[in-house]
Amino acid sequence: MILYQLMIPFYAGGIMIASLFNRKARLLIKGHKQIFKTLKEQVDPESSYLWFHASSLGEFEQGRPLIERLLKKHPECKILLTFFSPSGYEVRKDYKYADIVCYIPFDFRFSVIKFLDSVRIKKAFFIKYEFWPNFLDELHRREIDTYSISSIFRPEQLFFKWYGKGYANALRNFKHLFVQDRHSKDLLRSIGIECVSIVGDTRCDRVIEVASTSRQFPIIEKFVNGNPTFIAGSSWPQDEELFIPYFRGKKNWKLIIAPHEIHEEHLVSIENRLEGNSHIRLSKATMDNVSKCDTLIIDTIGLLSSIYRYGHLAYVGGGFGVGIHNILEPAVFDIPVLFGPNNRRFNEAQELKRLKGGFEVTDAYSLRILIDKFISDPAFMKKAGRAAGDYVRKSSGTSDRILGEIGLD
């Protein structure tokens, strides 16, 4: 742990240097400067808060159903929501179910103490991979019940190495860990941690809620016009290199692309790849011109989870980069899901592959073979879609089980 304490200044300093030329790092530093100002202005000193911390947007989506179910049962509760990454904070800084939204400070002991002195925390919830040793130590010292939600553990993590005992001790500060699978529970037991329950992924609750209230888009219905439709969600350039060439010649299929980043440079690069295909951006589409196009580019955020309802086959990006994005969003609509090879850390991907509802592609050839199979065998595509949807439905109810175990049901 001495090494950890020494590394924090180097990490924080690295982000400050990166902020000179990196937008996300710049947003992070800017947000950190506002943390204690925000708390001073917004904290009610007479109230206690339930603190939910998520690294980024994906982790927030795992904590979100817990927050919203909790408030339905206990509307009097006050919620503090923190993020580490700008990709979470910038999108959800106006989240209506939180009383306060801000960044979490770096894990320096002095900033931990200042943060916890600024707001009265009743219980704390750290989502998935969030393990901050100094925060966990101080929360435990103050006898604040702290929980790990929807976490996953793997043998290669530092906790399970002979030289990682100090980090493993930080996990003992959790009152309870709610993990996604049996393997995680067994790993924690191997280092003497027994306060563990297997509950699955809270995101299943969230995507079911979204599907049940998903928006309808007449203009997208007009675009699809009864044709089989391939939806590529949260795509990156590495993903687009694979599926765009395939669909250039598939005039009987419609293609919807919802890129992960919708800045102009990325949108133009997609349009250049689509040369020869009639395409249009959603922002420029009308009921008169949209049906004449083969490809629709979604250049607005916040719509993708509802748009999947119009698909027959989905591809979720990120698997050729840092990791796949949310594959449960299309799966809940009974759609087979394709994704890239960087999916080992995602339990839902492994389960969907096992159940033949999710499929890994490694290059353009494997993608072509797989989609050809779906197109030539509609019964296979329907069966795969049903397997994907059944997995999500059978995995629901996680949030209620967690609230029951911590006495907030």
Image: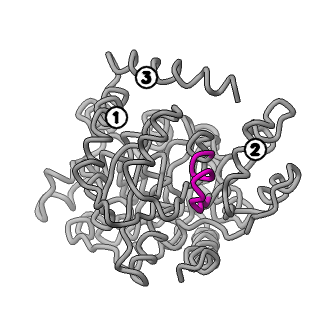
Q: Residues within 10 Å of mark 3 (few under 14, many from 20)?
A: some
Looking at marks 1 and 2 on the same chain, the residue that comes earlier in the sequence is marked by 1
| Amino acid, disc 2 | Asn
Mark 3 to mark 2: distance in Å?
Answer: 27 Å
Residue 358: name its quadrant: bottom right
143 within the magenta span: yes
Q: Position of residue 257 (x, y in %)?
A: 36, 50
For the point 33% across and 63% down, the residue is: 98
| Amino acid, disc 1 | His
Q: Position of residue 171 (x, y in %)?
A: 71, 49
Q: Nearer the viewer, mark 3 or mark 2?
A: 2
Mark 1 to mark 2: distance in Å?
Answer: 28 Å
Q: Nearer the viewer, residue 343 or 87?
A: 87
For the point 40% across and 59% down, the residue is: 253
157 within the magenta span: no
Q: Nearer the viewer, mark 1 or mark 3?
A: 1
Left/right of residue 32 with respect to residue 396 in the rendered view: left
Looking at the rendered image, the quarter that the N terminus falls into is top right
Give the residue number, with chain letter if any, for mark 1. Answer: 32
Q: Position of residue 325 (x, y in %)?
A: 50, 50
Give the residue number, with chain letter if any, for mark 2. Answer: 169
For the point 60% across and 22% down, the residue is: 7
Give the residue number, with chain letter if any, for mark 3. Answer: 15
Give the residues in magenta: 137-147
| Amino acid, disc 3 | Ile
